[in-house]
């Protein structure tokens, strides 16, 4: 064991084929000369084979690890920096056609992106009319394709820190093979756990696009009517109502508003509470009647002039 | 000299550039904020809210009386700006109008019965506007006291501003007051009574009935339907509702801040709805009633002196409700309140 020996994280990455070509070459050269490292690589390879066989089903999914993504991104960045704009332009297509897996991945990302944009536009258009009925199940009913690539990338970046930190903290000289096996297994499991899942991304994205104001079924029409009436009444009530009527009106309005607020909270707490919904709608109707009374009063006064 | 000439275009160019730069840097004029539109108070409107200009100034009023022979089923239409209005039914086929210290009486016949030639639709108005040369005044009657006698089978339609209205013994009544109490008795053919400030009292009447007040109380006593399916609707914003001795099978009573009292019999097959936001709902009914209560009482309470058979009950802190029956549960009683109490008492 010399000072040039590589840590277990690098060896594991080497075995996974995730190290840079230069680093792979240096590891190979070093293992040829260092017996301890060769033994360590052999043990790690054996343990990896055990782990891979145990987690064969999970690892066979075509999800690239974060290091692979990083390598791809780095390679692209280097090529972009050195190539002219025409080479970059043609390189994009050449890369896609030369690498079927990348082309497939890019195609999926593009389809998901287009679908997300279309769904988003449709969702914005229909938000005011349809969200009332969707409110209780909005997180469930959004299509999975809403998961935008940006959300996935964010998750990948976050999850990358965990295995790296684990690899860096392991020193091969102080760890027994049995313990090392456990570390490898736990590391793999953590990596798998932290790997981005589309279901989670969908859930996060659905929550992020949920509107700030959510209506119950039928609630929006009440709110709309009240808003329209209020605009009309606010300009009239000072002129139409006598002081005593005004006091009574404001008092009744305060009571109704309080009822609406309280029952809204109750319904938000328990959306299945039909009784609370009924009382809420009744309070909305009271408010409409109250506002209407001012309008009708003005009409009656006008008819008597 | 030549050097000056060669410098002149450069100097001109520099001046132009500096002028352009200074023009570009000239701050834009602040946007002119439009003045809010001034609200012109209508000349013919009330000087202060709830106070109306009298059509006839005090001292200028006259005391007069007029009458006209009409069909017994005549319909009388009128509006009153101010004054105490009393309308009574009598057994003559004649309308008599008396105004004390008020406007001159105008009687217009809008329609006659083709067979008898008797007036069937009559409009009472202020006669002053009929005179040429005078500025137009309100068409509505006004006076210290207005008394009208009409055939007992006549229908009345009244619109008033500040009017205390008492109507007795006519067939059908429609009254709309901006301000003032309404008292109606012995009207079998249906009532629509609305006042935005005042109480409404109905007694010994029938038919489809709608009683509404914005800020006053409503009392209904000894009221019955004229025909099957007639509805009794009662609504007030901040007043109390008291309904006693009713025979309607369909009743809707709604108050926002006031209480609702029903004292009577829940008839089989009846549909009853009692709502209030902040007040109490009290039902005083016979112990042997047959009804189903469907109560939603938000943050309120429910109490019953009569034993109930509970079908469903939700006693959560975020909205309570129950369904319960007495007897065979024929009548259906919906009760809704946000924070008021619901009480069922024995008669």
Image (cartoon, coloured by chain):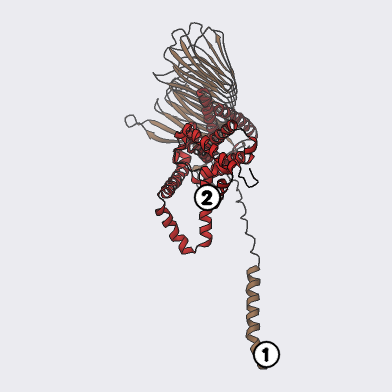
Toward which corner of the image does residue B101 lie, by quadrant? Answer: top right
Q: Is residue A249 above or below residue A228?
A: above
Q: Is residue B341 above or below residue B142?
A: above
Chain ID for brown: B
Q: Judge left or right: residue A104 versus residue B182.
A: left
Callout 2 secondary element: helix
Q: How far apart are marks 1 and 2 (CA)?
A: 69 Å
Q: Judge left or right: residue B3 versus residue B272.
A: right
Chain ID for red: A
A119 or B306: which is nearer to us? A119
Query: Dot 1: few (<14), some (14–19), or many (≥20) neighbours within 10 Å?
Result: few
- Quadrant in which the C terminus of chain B is drawn: top right
Callout 1 secondary element: helix
Query: Dot 2: few (<14), some (14–19), or many (≥20) neighbours within 10 Å?
Result: some
**Does the image show residue B147?**
no
User: In the image, what residue occupies the spot 63% across and 78% down?
Assistant: B16
- Quadrant in which the N terminus of chain B is drawn: bottom right
Marks 1 and 2 belong to one chain: no
- Residue matched to label 2: A71
Q: Which of marks 1 and 2 is in front?
A: 2
Percent coordinates x, y for residue A220 in the rendering: 49, 36
Q: Tag 1, which chain?
A: B
Percent coordinates x, y for residue A67 in the rendering: 54, 45
Q: In this view, does B122 lie above or below A147?
A: above
Q: Judge left or right: residue B104 versus residue A95.
A: right
Percent coordinates x, y for residue B179 in the rendering: 58, 31
Percent coordinates x, y for residue B154 in the rendering: 43, 25
Q: Which mark, by number, is residue B4?
A: 1
A25 or A1: which is nearer to us? A1
A14 or B337: which is nearer to us? A14
């Amino acid at each position: 064991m010399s000072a040039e020996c590589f840590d277990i994280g690098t060896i594991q990455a080497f075995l996974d084929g995730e190290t840079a070509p230069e680093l792979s070459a240096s590891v190979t050269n070093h293992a040829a000369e260092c017996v301890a490292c060769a033994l360590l690589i052999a043990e790690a390879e054996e343990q990896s084979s055990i782990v891979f066989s145990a987690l064969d089903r999970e690892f066979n999914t075509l999800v690239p690890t974060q290091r692979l993504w990083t390598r791809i991104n780095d390679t692209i960045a280097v090529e972009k920096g050195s190539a002219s704009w025409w080479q970059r332009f043609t390189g994009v297509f050449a890369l896609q056609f030369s690498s079927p897996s990348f082309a497939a991945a890019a195609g999926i990302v593009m389809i998901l992106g287009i679908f997300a944009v279309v769904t988003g536009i449709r969702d914005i258009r229909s938000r005011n009319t349809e969200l009332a009925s969707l409110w209780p199940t909005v997180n469930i009913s959004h299509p999975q394709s809403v998961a935008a690539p940006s959300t996935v990338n964010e998750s990948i970046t976050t999850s990358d820190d965990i295995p790296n930190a684990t690899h860096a903290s392991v020193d091969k000289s102080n760890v027994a093979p049995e313990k090392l096996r456990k570390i490898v297994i736990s590391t793999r499991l953590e990596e798998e756990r932290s790997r981005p899942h589309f279901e989670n991304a969908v859930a996060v994205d659905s929550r992020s696009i949920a509107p700030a104001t959510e209506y119950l079924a039928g609630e929006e029409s009440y709110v709309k009517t009240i808003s329209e009436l209020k605009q009309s009444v606010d300009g009239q009530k000072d002129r139409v109502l006598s002081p005593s009527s005004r006091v009574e009106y404001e008092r009744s309005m305060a009571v109704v508003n309080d009822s609406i607020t309280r029952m809204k909270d109750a319904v938000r707490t328990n959306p299945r509470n039909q009784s609370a919904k009924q009382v809420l709608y009744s309070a909305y109707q009271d408010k409409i009647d109250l506002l209407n009374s001012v309008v009708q009063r003005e009409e009656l006064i006008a008819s008597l002039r | 000299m030549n050097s000056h000439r060669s410098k002149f275009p450069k100097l001109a160019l520099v001046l132009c550039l500096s002028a352009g730069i200074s023009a570009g840097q000239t701050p834009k004029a602040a946007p002119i904020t439009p003045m809010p539109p001034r609200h012109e108070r209508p000349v013919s409107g009330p000087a202060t809210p709830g106070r109306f200009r009298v059509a006839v100034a005090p001292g200028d009023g006259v005391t007069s009386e007029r009458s006209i022979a009409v069909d017994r089923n005549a319909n009388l239409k009128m509006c009153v700006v101010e004054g105490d209005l009393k309308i009574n039914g009598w057994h003559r086929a004649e309308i008599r109008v008396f105004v004390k210290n008020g406007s001159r009486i105008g009687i217009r016949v809008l329609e006659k019965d083709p067979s008898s030639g008797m007036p069937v639709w009559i409009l009472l108005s202020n006669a002053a506007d009929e005179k040429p040369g005078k500025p137009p005044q309100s068409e509505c009657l006004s006076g210290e006291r207005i008394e009208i006698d009409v055939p007992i089978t006549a229908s009345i339609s009244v619109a008033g501003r500040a009017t205390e209205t008492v109507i007795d013994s006519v067939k059908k009544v429609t009254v709309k007051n901006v301000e003032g109490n309404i008292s109606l008795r012995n009207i079998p053919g249906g009532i629509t009574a609305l006042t935005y400030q005042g109480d409404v009292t109905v007694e010994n009447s029938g038919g489809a009935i709608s009683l509404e007040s914005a800020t006053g109380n409503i009392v209904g006593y000894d009221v019955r339907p004229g025909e099957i399916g007639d509805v009794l609707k009662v609504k007030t914003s901040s007043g109390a509702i008291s309904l006693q001795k009713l025979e309607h099978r369909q009743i809707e009573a709604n108050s926002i801040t006031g209480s609702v009292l029903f004292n009577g019999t829940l008839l089989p097959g009846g549909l009853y709805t009692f709502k209030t936001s902040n007040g109490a709902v009290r039902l005083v009914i016979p112990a042997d009633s047959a009804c189903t209560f469907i109560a939603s009482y938000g943050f309120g309470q429910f109490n019953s002196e009569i034993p109930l058979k509970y079908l469903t009950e939700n006693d959560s802190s975020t909205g309570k409700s129950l369904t319960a029956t007495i007897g065979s549960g024929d009548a259906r009683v919906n009760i809704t309140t946000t924070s008021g109490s619901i009480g069922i008492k024995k008669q």
